Image (cartoon, rainbow, N blue to C red):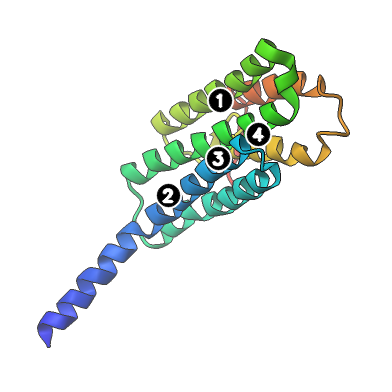
Amino acid sequence: MFFYHKLVDTTVKKMKSHAANFITISNMSFGGAAIMATLHEYYSYSVLFIFIAALLDRYDGKVARALGQVSELGKQLDSMSDIISFGVAPALLMYEVVLVDFGFVGMMMAVLFIVCGAMRLARFNISEANGYFTGLPITAAGTFLTLTYFAAYTFHPAFYLFLFPILAFLMISTFTLKKV
């Protein structure tokens, strides 16, 4: 009987230790699915997958803190997930929807967004937690960029030649936002 109790206890501990990382990997999976959907011109699915990734991203850290399972691995995994789900996926989506006709300039805007998002995440990973974000979080920038999909045919495509660099520079700027 003691053996089963120990086995169950060990299994529950392992599940607790991996719960937040499972949510993060799910976030990353939806980001990857969004990229694949964009490549196959299923833009609406791509938007949906990015929004699901944003929902999952909202809870991975909360679950880790609630279960007492915050780790350096989890922090790094979260950043890798964020660059896929909120950097590459939204940039590729909006590039394909509105910037592709701008050729090299459109491509550079999408790359600038991704690079600044990666720099923002790298800075976050080496900074101490102080209750504030420095610069616009990539999750917010990528989700906002994705949200503009619904107005993409309302705005002139040149609007995005300004939006991409504005969001990119807001991510690497030094203003602070209180964490919510």
Q: Amino acid at mark 1?
A: Ile
Where is residue 180? Give x, y as percent. Answer: 60, 48
**Tag 4 residue:** 93
Where is residue 31? Give x, y as percent. Answer: 53, 43
Mark 4–mark 2 distance (CA, rounded to whole Å): 21 Å
Determine whether, in the image, residue 109 is placed left or right of residue 122. right
**Mark found first going from the N terminus, 1 or 4:** 4
Mark 1–mark 4 distance (CA, rounded to whole Å): 12 Å
Quadrant of the frame with the N terminus: bottom left
Place residue 168 in its image quadrant: top right
Please state which of residues 168 and 26 is positioned toward the viewer in this rendering.
26
Q: Which mark is residue 114?
A: 1
Mark 2–mark 1 distance (CA, rounded to whole Å): 20 Å
**Mark found first going from the N terminus, 2 or 1:** 2
3 vs 2, front mark: 3
**Mark found first going from the N terminus, 3 or 2:** 2
Determine whether, in the image, residue 174 is placed left or right of residue 65. right
1 vs 4, front mark: 4
**Secondary structure under the numbered disc 2 in the rendered image:** helix
4 vs 3, front mark: 3
Where is residue 129? Give x, y as percent. Answer: 44, 39
Which residue is at a point 48% across and 56% down the rendered structure image? 62
Q: Amino acid at mark 3?
A: Met
Asked whether disc 2 touches disc 1, contact meaning CB atoms under 8 Å apart, the reply is: no
**Tag 3 residue:** 36
Mark 1–mark 3 distance (CA, rounded to whole Å): 17 Å
Mark 3–mark 2 distance (CA, rounded to whole Å): 16 Å
Where is residue 105? Give x, y as percent. Answer: 68, 12
Please state which of residues 64 and 114 is positioned toward the viewer in this rendering.
114
**Tag 2 residue:** 25
1 vs 3, front mark: 3
